[in-house]
Amino acid sequence: MNVETKCLHAGYEPQNGEPRQLPIYQSTTWKYDSSDDMGKLFDLEASGYFYTRLQNPTNDLVAAKIAALEGGVAGMLTSSGQAANFFALFNICETGSHIVASSAIYGGTYNLLGVTMKKMGIDVTFVDQTLSEEELQKAFRPNTRAVFGETITNPTVSVFDIEKFARLAHGNGVPLIVDNTFATPVNCRPIEFGADIVTHSTTKYMDGHATGVGGAIVDSGNFDWMAHADKYPGMTTPDESYHGIVYAEKFGKLGYITKATSQLMRDLGSIQSPMNAFYLNNGLESLHVRMDRHCDNALKIARFLKAQDKVAWIHYPNLEGDDNYELAQKYLPNGSCGVIAFAVKGGRDAAIRFMDSLKLMIIATHVADARTCLLHPASHTHRQLTDEQLREAGVAPDLIRLSVGLENADDLIADLQQALDRI
Ligand SMILES: *Cc1c(COP(=O)(O)O)cnc(C)c1O
């Protein structure tokens, strides 16, 4: 099946007489006939459901769709994109581990790694993702356990050179984890370029309608944990909390997701509600159609903004002449996403006057939505970062993040025009 067809048909495949729409298993618990039946589940000797803090069939069917879209072997849903990135990393890191991450990642993930995971004794080195392989190699240490980046960075819309980072990660015997939120598997499938694990904030394009916060993790099954057994004791030595199971041995290519589900979900309980998974599945069914329209609209608007005297600068990866144009041609030939980063001349005051003058476009702490929205990261999403951290993350103080929706592009351009006229 092609990706468009998978959006509709992967995951839940109803059998004769079963409901066409995905059933919502709105149940915390499952019933078993004998104590022994249930005991086997707790020993991971049989697969089945027992408690929604760990697993729920509605979630698993939607995760299976996302795994199919990404070309992975297994997936899981989490309560948010933050939980997805935390679980993806914490599943293979522990106190004393080190992570190499692009400095251009989403502000929330930057804090997760640089503040919260640091408190857990997991160190991070943020790198300029445009450096050469030779320069980037210097960031690796003997205790490095993962490399992390975003296919298209939020909010600077820079394109991550997945193959370059996959070579570096694999050369150092660690997996590459890529947050594919902005591109979605419709526009880029990082596993095809060497990524080992893919994460998502499903809150964004996958849901697409600002309905539910959620996340997803997909494993390619390609990373050989046993070949690097000394680095990943959690995957390759007995888990005493499951009677000595060795995940990479017992579950093979499914070991990584099985561990994240049966250990991290069990202990940290960041599951997506089945109701939200149902909404997410509805969003996924039209993802390919919406991504096309988001990209068409964004390119029209990027061209419009570029031609305006009052616009100081603009970044959109598919815009001819953009710094990331070459990388976009390689990784995102059919389009990138609906997000544009730009600035108006006149600094912060002009930016605020411009934003407050918009009538159709709304100011929202959201992105990748059906309705056009925008924000000013330095005063909103990234306001907890210092000026130096902002610079390190490549977020200019005047950057406006415009998330182009599905409206008619002419209506959006008219709104931008009247707001620019007011500066
Ligand atoms: C929004 C976002 C996140 C965090 O996701 P939530 O669902 O808000 O927790 C992570 N990565 C990227 C690229 C995002 O845009």
Image (cartoon, helix red, strand yellow):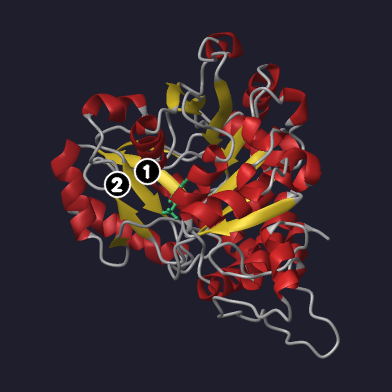
Residue, disc 1 = 108
Q: Nearer the viewer, residue 322 or 23?
A: 23
How much space separates mark 2 and mark 1, taking CA atoms? 8 Å
Asked whether the viewer can see residue 41, the reply is yes
Left or right of 80 on screen, residue 296: right
Q: Are the two marked residues, 2 and 1, in contact with CB atoms closer than 8 angstroms?
A: yes
Q: Residue 268, percent across and down?
A: 47, 53
Quadrant location of residue 144?
A: top right
Other-residue count near label 1 (Cα within 10 Å), few / some / many at <14 / 14–19 / ≥20: some
Residue under the image location 25 percent in, 61 percent down: 358
Residue under the image location 58 percent in, 76 percent down: 29
Q: Dot 1: what SS?
A: helix
Quadrant location of residue 369?
A: bottom left
Q: Dot 2: what SS?
A: loop
Quarter of the image that includes the N terminus: bottom right
406 versus 251 height, above or below: below
Please, what is the three-letter code of the amino acid marked with disc 2? Thr
Quadrant location of residue 388?
A: top left
Tell me if the residue at label 2 has its CB under 8 Å from ligand 1: no
Q: Nearer the viewer, residue 385 or 231?
A: 231
Left or right of 175 on screen, residue 128: left
Please, what is the three-letter code of the amino acid marked with disc 1? Gly
Name the residue at the front extreme: 35
Tell me if the residue at label 1 has its CB under 8 Å from ligand 1: yes
Q: Nearer the viewer, residue 306 or 55?
A: 55
Residue, disc 2 = 381
Q: Residue 148, percent across and down?
A: 54, 32
Name the residue at the left extreme: 349
Asked whether the viewer can see residue 218, the reply is no
